[in-house]
Amino acid sequence: MTTEFDLTCATCGSSLSKKSVSVDRLGFRNVGSVDVAACGNCGDQYFPESTLERLR
């Protein structure tokens, strides 16, 4: 199964890596941190399905 971490950045084409970010920064409370697929080149972030499920 392909995940967001296996894809390349839609903006610049660079590899994505798993990064943990605080959800307080995203405007959510009481969830702690979640994993995102982050581009080390341009900084874009993509939310895996598992992260979106936690934020519902």
Image (cartoon, rainbow, N blue to C red):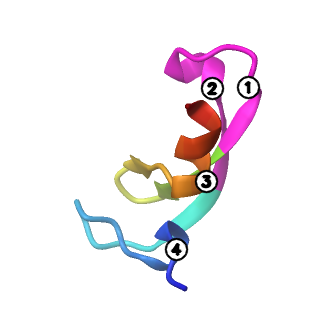
Q: Residue at x 50, y 82 (%)?
A: 2
Above or below for 48 versus 10: above
Residue type at the position of mark 4:
Thr
Please check the rendered image and state whether residue 8 is part of the magenta-colored stretch, yes or no: no
Q: Secondary structure at mark 1?
A: loop
Asked if marks 3 and 1 touch (Cβ < 8 Å), the reply is no
State the mark number for residue 3.
4
Circle 2/circle 4 CB separation < 8 Å? no
Q: Position of residue 36 (x, y in %)?
A: 56, 50
Q: Position of residue 1 (x, y in %)?
A: 55, 85
Name the residue that disc number 3 marks.
50
Name the disc covering residue 23, or none: 2
What segment carries the magenta color?
A: 19-34
Q: Secondary structure at mark 2?
A: helix
Specify the label residue 18 is tagged with.
Answer: none
> Residue 52: where, in percent of width, then height?
53, 43
Amino acid at the residue labelled 2? Val
> Who is closer to the viewer here, 9 or 53?
53
Q: Residues within 10 Å of mark 3 (few under 14, many from 20)?
A: few
- Which label was assigned to residue 31? 1
Q: Indicate which disc, 2 or 1, sits on the residue closer to the N terminus.
A: 2
In the image: residue 11, left or right of residue 35: left
Q: Which label's residue is closer to the chain start, 3 or 2?
A: 2
